[in-house]
Amino acid sequence: QLQLVESGGGSMQPGGSLRLSCAASGLAFDHYAIGWFRQAPGKEREGVSCINSRDDTTYYVDSVKGRFTISRDNAKKMVYLQMNSLKSEDTAVYYCAAGFNPFTAIQSMCALSKFFTSWGQGTQVTVAS
């Protein structure tokens, strides 16, 4: 399993941008799909964006399409989530997660957090004026 550490969270006004980073340690990072999940108070955790291991195919939940961009750097064992045009409804704790399921489509993996077996501790993102 991988060990994951998120960073880059903070407070931002609506319309602003933040970049979350996820640093991984462990073997075979490039074999893992990586996902960003978030959980707001009183709400269930949801998959925000995921990227697969084979060809960097990405998935985004509808609410962030066109605003968020996920990317990975396998040489550095890093995954990023660039968040632009932030909205108050983006406020949540954001988690980085890794899963090894090479035969599962990335959109299916992102829809069910059970596919991800390694999780970071989370980073708070607050969007408020």
Image (cartoon, grey):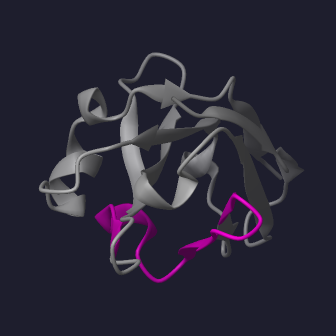
Image point (71%, 60%), residue name: 78
Magenta span has 20?
Answer: no
Q: Is residue 31 above or below residue 91?
A: below
Residue 4 point in image, percent of width and height: 67, 35
Task: Count the marks.
Answer: 0
- Left-right relation of 113 to 7: left
The residues colored magenta run 58-80
Residue 73 point in image, percent of width and height: 67, 72
Extreme residue toward the front, this view: 27
Query: 30 or 18: nearer the eye?
Result: 30
Which image quadrant is residue 42 in? top left
Q: Is residue 4 above or below residue 10?
A: above
Image point (74%, 42%), residue name: 125
Q: Is residue 96 above or below residue 14?
A: above
Query: 127 or 114: nearer the eye?
Result: 114
Image point (75%, 56%), residue name: 20
- Left-right relation of 86 to 19: left
Query: 81 or 16: nearer the eye?
Result: 81
Image point (30%, 66%), residue name: 62
Residue 11 point in image, percent of width and height: 87, 46
Residue 6 point in image, percent of width and height: 75, 40
Magenta span has 69?
Answer: yes
Extreme residue toward the top, this view: 42
Q: Is residue 88 above or below residue 30?
A: above
Which image quadrant is residue 106 in? bottom left
